[in-house]
Structures are given as structure tokens and as C-alpha cells.
Amino acid sequence: MSETPKFYYPNRMGRVVLQSTEQVIGPDRFNTLITSTDNPDLFRLPPANLNKQFPFEAISALQAAIEAAFGVPAGRNINLQAGRQCLDKGLKQFDPVLGIADLPLRLMPVGMKFRVGLDVFARLFNTYSDQVVNIRSTPTHMLWVIERCPVCWERKTDAPCCQLAQGLLEESIFWGTGGRRYHIEEVECIAMGDPACVFQIDKQPLD
């Protein structure tokens, strides 16, 4: 019987997720939370390098542990906040590669920034991690489609549970568009039995 294939985030992304979660819930509760899990990858802060060594199941286990500790609604809100923190906690360090702050992009109209920014962030995950992201368009929405998702890896839930990914996507778009907010909703989730985790993003900003 073949084993389930192993997929990874780069250490830097795993480090950012752990630090962001700790910032949201506080060091004491974070340590208690980690102790309650049986995943050894959560007990150490990985180095800030791009080696793909932080396993998907560690990301997923952290999300599940937070829901178990705080209750599903509160836990998913914590995961959403942690996702929002991820950008400032370290993913902005990828900007020299992403080029978000480059002058030509900053001079683009907001609608173009929105589309180009999504393409750039998809390339970040597809290049530096084993996460697989595709972008699709409908007349009214952009769809951020995660075909291999670390956030809900091997989970089974009754409702979408990739709030960490949603929070990061929200803040990434906010940063990439120079401060515009867009409504985002996860409408499909692999943990629910869907073929991909699909985030529906309104093409028009909220403001």
C-alpha cells in the first residue's frame, strides 16, 4: 500500500504562520495549544530559509487545534486573523521577488493592480511551495483556486475551513492594490469533498 505523498511549505512560510498565530492568541496560550497537539513540526520554529521542509499536515494540524481549543466559530476567526498577520510578519520579505513595490505596478490603475497582484501571489506559492494555485475569471468575480491546499490538508469538515488562506489573501490584495478592500468568500473546500478550495473575489472593491 503506497504512502500519502508529502508536500511542503518553505521553512520561511511555516515560520511566518507560527509567529502570526502566536501574535494573535498570545505566547502563553500558543504554547499551551502547541503542547496539546501531537505534531512534532509545531514544537520548533523553523529557520527563515526557502527550503521546502515545513509539511502541509503541520499547517492543517494547527488550524484544527485552534478550532478544538477555542470552538469552531472563534477558532476560525483566530485563523483568519493569523492569516492577515502573515503578510506583515514576513511574507512581505518576498517583495524583491514579487515586485509589488516596483514603480510600474504602483502606477497601474487599481483594476490592473488587482489582477496583476493575484498573478504575482499565485506565482509565489507555485514557485516556492508545493501549494498549487490557479486563477480564473467570471464576469463578476476572480476565483483564487487552490488545487493542493495545506490549510485543510487531510481534514474533513462540514463548512469551508481555510480561513488562514482567506486572511492572507485579503491582506495581500489590500497591500498589492495600495489599500483597497475586496469581498472574499470561500465557496468550495477540499475538506468538504470539493475538488479544490475556491475563493470568490468581487472584481469591484468595497470602497
Image (cartoon, rainbow, N blue to C red):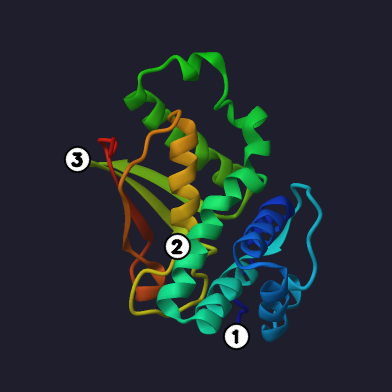
Of the residues shown, which amino acid type is indicated by label 2? Answer: Gln
Q: CA gap, disc 2 to disc 1? A: 33 Å
Residue 204: which numbered mark, if any?
none
Q: Quadrant of the C terminus?
A: top left
Of the residues shown, which amino acid type is indicated by label 3? Answer: Thr
Q: Which residue is mark 3?
A: 140
Q: Which residue is mark 1?
A: 1
Q: Which residue is mark 2?
A: 163
Closer to viewer: mark 3 or mark 2: 2
Q: Residue 124's spot in the image, x, y percent? A: 57, 41
Instruction: Name the residue: 52% across, 70% down.
Output: 153
Q: CA gap, disc 1 to disc 3? A: 45 Å
Relative horizontal placement of residue 124, taking residue 11 as reference (left or right): left
Q: Of residues 175 and 140, which is closer to you in this image?
A: 175
Q: Is residue 127 above or below residue 177?
A: below
Decide: few, some or many residues near mark 1? Use Cα within 10 Å; few <14, some 14-19, many ≥20: few
Closer to viewer: mark 2 or mark 1: 2
Decide: few, some or many residues near mark 3? Use Cα within 10 Å; few <14, some 14-19, many ≥20: few
Decide: few, some or many residues near mark 2? Use Cα within 10 Å; few <14, some 14-19, many ≥20: many
Instruction: Name the residue: 51% across, 58% down.
Output: 81
Of the residues shown, which amino acid type is indicated by label 1? Answer: Met
Mark 1 and mark 3 residues within 8 Å of each other at the beta carbon: no
Q: Secondary structure at mark 3?
A: loop
Q: Earlier in the sequence, mark 3 or mark 2?
A: 3
Mark 3 and mark 2 residues within 8 Å of each other at the beta carbon: no
Q: Secondary structure at mark 2?
A: helix
Relative horizontal placement of residue 56, taking residue 72 as reference (left or right): right
Q: Residue 56's spot in the image, x, y percent? A: 61, 66
Instruction: Name the residue: 67% across, 75% down.
Output: 29
Q: Residue 15's spot in the image, x, y percent? A: 72, 57
